[in-house]
Amino acid sequence: MATVLVLLERRAGELKRASLQAVSAARQLAGPSGRVDALALGTGAETCAAAVGPAGADRLLVAADAAFDRYAPETYSAALAHAAKDGGSEIVLAAGTSLGRDVAARTAAKLSTGLLSDVIALELSPGGLRGRRPLYSGKAFAWESIPQARPAMATLRPNAFAVTSTGQAAEVVTLAVPVVAARVIATRLETPPEQELDVAEAPVIVSGGRGLKAPEHFSLVRDLAKALGGAVGASRAVVDAGWIPHAHQVGQTGKVVSPGLYVACGISGAIQHLAGMSSSKVIVAINKDADAPIFKVATYGIVGDVFEVLPKLTEEVKKLRS
Amino acid sequence: MKIVVCVKHVPDTEARIRIAADGKRPDLAGVKTIVSPYDEYALEEALLLRESGAATEIVAISAGGDEVAASLRQALAVGADRAVHVHDPALAGADALSRAKALAAAITAEAPDLVFTGKMGVGDDEGQVGPMLAELLDRPHVGNAGKLTIEAGRFTAWRGVEGAVEVMEGSLPALLTWDKGEHEPRYASLKGIMAAKKKPLDVRKAADLGVVAEPPRVVRESMELPPPRPAGKILTGDAATAAHELARLLHEEAKVL
């Protein structure tokens, strides 16, 4: 039994799936007799009711002031702190996205409370909120808890929690949130010209490394990613060499990913790369060197030349999917 | 313009992690330590701002026990003008808000126009200290920045969000947490390393800065290594045979196609 508040995140009016996952996780923590509040900010905030009710929210708190249409850490953290105090929340959750982690940390300082970052499991114990989280980008894991500080806060790694459906509708409650003056505000979003899937959220990732020999050969990786409906990843070596932007980097100083399928092409498997992808469900390694460390984490491995194997594999995948 | 850059002392990203006897913390004996890579990006951006004439002074600040001095010397070696070490061995195991409060005490005394941190310290991977510092210092912040321009007290920052870049505009003073940007961190030259020995490194006891020890809000219960992955299958034959077999296995056995 607990009162749990969830910060919802919308981009271009669209509610993020990671937010719904947080709502369902909140329902689990609150139990049937607890209360789950979801906070939506900005114009059209009330439209979230249809989605958050079934995912587990009892109430949708709406602060529809247009000032929230553009992201500002100061206004968002003030609103979240206000909603937590107003509703007597014992637990406050947010999706572990760029925005969620930003707002949660600032809010935790405002409320002088504890925050568990990027958890992959959550439970309520007599000792307070407990969360399991990756350390060193997944080289290790820890259980951490917040015994006394309230509200206990956590950000949830996207896709680590499932959306469950209860079929109830959420009660819409208008929340009068003070809008503070923001000294920095988001003015626009620049999306890459070719709308590429982001590795952090992709269900399938095909990554390339040094074994591709030259940046132009990344097309082989792109072709397979396209055939699989996945995102393009890369090792640190090729990002450092300027073959592909850092947004594609998988590993300890890049993105930590756990897709359903990860295909490593011409990647030897440095420790910092393995840390970033070894929790993927199925790992495929294609590399010339049979002793490459990547084969130690691979579900399936092909010891061979990426220039020969990749075109054939792309062809086979296309056949299967057609 | 004065910039404070916060640096954290962390195990090398290439290091293999072992668990200490208490079952809660990493065993760092014999592990090479480095300045957290995101802090290096932050420092590089600060150095470039000084080289362009926009900034006049760069102060590196770190909080912790004796061990963090090495990271401050490194920051001085690549070009920071001076360093402040908030000394308190207890901070190494303290929660993010306690560490942010210790840093905030030292930063307040410096009154910088800009505060830079990395987007997270690698290892703990929390990404909490930067935004918390901004709140404690009562200044606006941009998290995950990769690029910054400044003109007449106003700034524009580009920050990474899922699948896009968000452009933020604001006024100084401010705080930015840095992701990898457009610039590679420079290496310390031998001359820089020698010069760093003569640059001021001010060691201040946390208590003298008014930092009050607080009971931890976040408690580490246990730490474990990930379970080993079961042994995989190596597919043999020429490229066409292996590719065909792989596609079949992904479809029929792993059911991911």
Image (cartoon, rainbow, N blue to C red):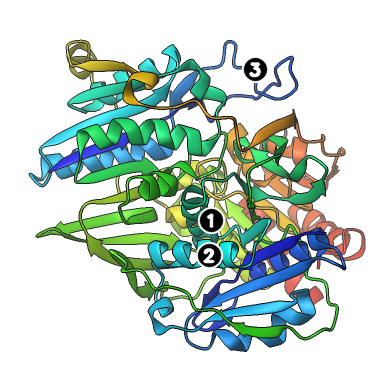
A259 left or right, relative to B160: right
Q: Secondary structure at mark 2?
A: helix
Q: Is residue B86 above or below residue B115?
A: above
Gap between marks 2 and 1 measured at Cα: 8 Å
State the mark number for residue A80: 2
Residue B29 in which image quadrant: top right
**Host chain of mark 2:** A
Q: Position of residue A65 (x, y in %)?
A: 43, 83
Q: Inspect the image, locate mark 1, and give the three-letter code of the amino acid beneath it.
A: Ala
A212 left or right, relative to A72: right
Mark 2 or 3: in front is: 2
The one of A197 and B216 positioned closer to us in this rendering: B216
Do labels 2 and 1 touch, CB within 8 Å?
A: yes
Residue at position x 59%, y 30% from top? Answer: B215
- Few, some or many residues within 10 Å of mark 2 (<14, 14–19, 20+): many
**Host chain of mark 1:** A
Q: Position of residue B79 (x, y in %)?
A: 20, 27
Gap between marks 3 and 1 measured at Cα: 30 Å
Gap between marks 2 and 3 measured at Cα: 38 Å
Residue B63 in which image quadrant: top left
Q: Secondary structure at mark 3?
A: loop
Q: Secondary structure at mark 1?
A: helix
Q: Inspect the image, locate mark 2, and give the three-letter code of the amino acid beneath it.
A: Leu
Do labels 3 and 1 touch, CB within 8 Å?
A: no
- The answer to whether residue A229 of the structure is visible from this angle is no
Q: Which residue is mark 1?
A: A104
Q: Which residue is mark 3?
A: B27
Please count the marks in the image.
Answer: 3
Q: Is residue B109 above or below residue B244?
A: above
Residue B5 in which image quadrant: top left
